[in-house]
Image (cartoon, rainbow, N blue to C red):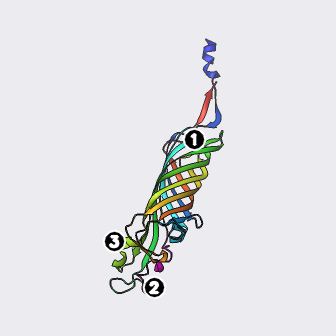
Amino acid sequence: MAALLSLPLGLSAQTSGGHDTLQCFIVGFKFGTMFPSSSLSKATLASGETSDRATMYSLYDSPWLDFGVNAFYKFKSNWMLSLDGDFWFGNDNLTHRQDRMDVLYTNEGTIIGANGTDAVVTCYNRGLAIQGGVGKVLPLWPSRNPNSGLLARVMVGPMFQQTVFMLNEVKAPQIEGDNALIYDHQRMGFMLTEGLGFWFMSNRSNLINFFVAFEVSEVWSKSTRDYTYDHYIGLNGKDDSRYFDLIYTIKLSWMFPLKGKTARDYYYY
């Protein structure tokens, strides 16, 4: 009887000193800076010749801002599936705009509005991409934090980009509505992205989870317009060129796991 009564008192517990590897959904909000390549981006003309004009690098001053959201499903093996949405834009950054749209500008470098005064036009790039991907976290401290470490990812999906024109209160019908489509260089295609970075998930808090990454994106695209005018590159008609753009991105994402914090393992003896 004494032995039976003493049995529970002989049980004790200790922590293993390690942590669980999480399997859960994760959502994140990200922002970054994009830099198109000047030397590796190119346009392949209908004749087969290549040119560095009308690539994203030559169309727009860089860098651009990138904002977006991402969603992950992370497995206990640290492999993950992801879905990323990115929206990027510049700040009044269309280059050589007077040469490109020379038919709209006066000799004084203005666009005359409907009331006969200068219509101040802001011209900037805008892009959108949705990519699905796969990745893995390679833990740097497996016993202390198996959910954090080096991050490697590959993603692919459709993309869209164009020039956007914004006017002040003065109307300018020659660059509004359907007329703007002649000059906006709208293109669609697909984007392939490879990324390397650092992934951190806290053992104690659902609010301190993030990753930083350097990404390289290859973009293949074609014009969606039936008619494009760009005097700077000598284009007056259908744009049949095929475009390849290489873009570098530095990105930070703040993440929120849809599950509680990681737990220590307990062993009883």
Count residues near mark 3 (Cα–Cα under 10 Å), then give few for <14, some for 14-19, many for 20+. Answer: few
Q: Quadrant of residue 173?
A: bottom left
Count residues near mark 2 (Cα–Cα under 10 Å), then give few for <14, some for 14-19, many for 20+. Answer: few
Instruction: Tell me the number on the disc at residue 109.
Output: 2
Marks 1/3: CA–CA distance: 49 Å
Asked if one can make out residue 60 in the rendered structure from this viewpoint, the answer is no
Q: Nearer the viewer, residue 46 or 254?
A: 46
Asked if one can make out residue 53 in the rendered structure from this viewpoint, the answer is yes
| Secondary structure mostly taken by the magenta-highlighted segment of the chain | loop
- 249 sits to left or right of 186: right
Q: Residue at coordinates 62% horizontally, 44% vertically from top-left?
A: 138
Instruction: Tell me the number on the disc at residue 209.
Output: none
**Element carrying mark 3:** helix
Q: Residue at coordinates 36% horizontally, 80% vertically from top-left?
A: 170
Of labels 1 and 3, the one closer to you: 3
Q: Position of residue 222 (x, y in %)?
A: 45, 62
Q: Quadrant of residue 9?
A: top right
Q: Is residue 224 above or below residue 166?
A: above
Q: How many marks do you count on the picture?
A: 3
The region drawn magenta spans 90-107
Tell me which amino acid carries mark 2: Gly
Tell me which amino acid carries mark 1: Asn
- 72 sits to left or right of 113: right
Q: Residue at coordinates 52% horizontally, 51% vertically from top-left?
A: 155
- 171 sits to left or right of 69: left
Q: Is residue 245 above or below residue 173?
A: above
Q: Position of residue 260 (x, y in %)?
A: 51, 41
- Would you name the residue on which mark 3 appears? 178
Which quadrant is the N terminus positioned in?
Answer: top right
- Would you name the residue on which mark 1 appears? 78
